Image (tube, rainbow, N blue to C red):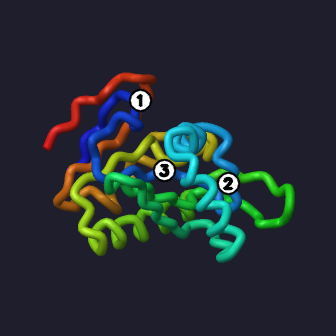
Amino acid sequence: MIYEVSGDILLSGAQAIAHGVAPNDHFDSGLALSLREKWPALAKDFRHYAHQVHPKSGELWMWGAVGGVRIFNLMTQEGEHAHGAKPGKATFSNVNHALRRLRHELEKEKISSLALPALATGVGGISWKDVKPLIQENLGDLNIPIYVYSTYQKNVKATEKN
């Protein structure tokens, strides 16, 4: 079940958080920066993973934090692995593919709840009215609470239903 909420996703009580990144992301802006500040090892581990695997847009990489929190890094944006390359914009194809992979991982890992932002709408550059139906289509029938933080409010805990 999808619940659209307002608040700070970093205060979510969900077992997992998903967010959009580029395969060569530096975690230096948007939600990725906030996640890096809260869990510095996340960005370090992602850089190591990206250098080893050279992931492609549309893929997903899961990271586990102390206390059982899982972070699903959805590669919704374009991004080359060449030295100095900057992360690009998100595409509908990448978002759709990453959401399908997310669904698979949520089921496989038996994740009990998920929080995600208005995916690919910040740095990714896609309109929320275009992304929202993709989230509904790919995750809407899952039997877990999915909290979509469509409006960011710093330091405000959203009301999350169970």
**Does the image show residue 127?**
no
Q: Quadrant of residue 122?
A: top right
* Quarter of the picture holding the C terminus: top left
Give the labeled residue for mark 1.
Answer: 151
Q: In the visual, does 140 lie left or right of 9?
A: left
Residue 32 position in % (x across, y down): 57, 44
Would you say the residues marked 1 and 2 are in contact, meaning their CB atoms lie under 8 Å apart? no
Of tags 1 and 2, the one toward the viewer is 2
- Element at badge 1? strand
Residue 41 position in % (x across, y down): 56, 53
Which of the marked residues, 2 or 3, is nearer the chain's N terminus?
3
Residue positioned 57% across, 47% down in the render: 40
- The answer to whether residue 122 is above or below residue 6 is below
Using the numbered discs, state the Cα–Cα distance from disc 1 to disc 2 in whole angstroms: 23 Å
**Does the image show residue 73?**
yes
Using the numbered discs, state the Cα–Cα distance from disc 3 to disc 1 in whole angstroms: 14 Å
Q: In the visual, does 46 lie left or right of 161?
A: right
Q: Residues within 10 Å of mark 1 (few under 14, many from 20)?
A: some
Work out whether residue 153 or residue 2 is closer to the camera in this orientation and state it: 153
- Element at badge 3? strand
- Residue type indicated by callout 3: His
Give the labeled residue for mark 3.
Answer: 19
Of tags 3 and 1, the one toward the viewer is 3
Residue positioned 50% across, 67% down in the render: 60
**The residue positioned farthest toward the front in the image shown:** 66
Which of the marked residues, 1 or 2, is nearer the chain's N terminus?
2
